[in-house]
Image: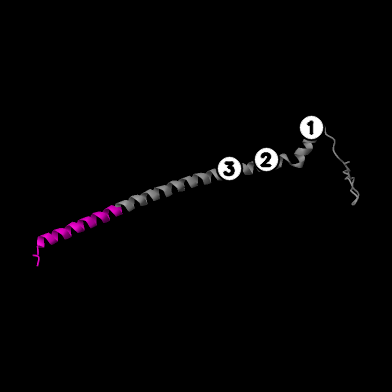
Amino acid sequence: MTPYHPKRAIGAEQKNRFFLNLTIGAALLLLSVAYFIQINGLVAKNFELRKIQVYLQEHQQINQRLMVNLTQTRSLNNLEAAVKNLNLVAVDKVSYLKIIPGIFALSQRP
């Protein structure tokens, strides 16, 4: 039978608790660092997303203004004024080419 040493058993138990506490503390520290890195990345992406949304809204407004300008430029009044300035002849009556079905000119190659 081996003799019982109370001081030795208590010391080993304290040593095991110390290492367990140290391991848990290191794991918590590592997890908190990983958490802060993830949160920092998320916040950075959020700011970038807001910046891109503002950029998109500005360009949509520019696009709308350009479409209004294009519509005004293509309006009938402006086209008529351009016709007069360029001395073009206005077309009064339009006649279309009538195609008779079934009659086509075929070319034959020798």
Q: Give the image quarter of residue 81.
A: top right
**Is 2 left or right of 22, judged from the image as shown?**
left
Residue 95: percent from left, percent from top: 89, 44
Instruction: Identify residue for label 3.
Output: 59
Judging from the image, the colouring scheme is one colour
Secondary structure, mark 1, is helix
Q: Name which quarter of the figure residue 17 lies in.
A: bottom left
> Looking at the image, which residue is at 36% across and 50% down?
36
Q: Residue at x 26, y 55 (%)?
A: 23
The residue identified by callout 1 is: 85
Which amino acid, by three-letter code, is at mark 3? His
- The residue labelled by disc 2 is 69
- Mark 3 or mark 2, which has the lower sequence index? 3
Magenta segment: 1-28
Query: What mark, if any, has residue 8 been given in the picture?
Result: none
Disc 2 marks a residue whose amino acid type is Asn
Mark 3 or mark 1, whichever is nearer to me:
3
For the C terminus, the quadrant is top right
Q: Secondary structure at mark 3?
A: helix
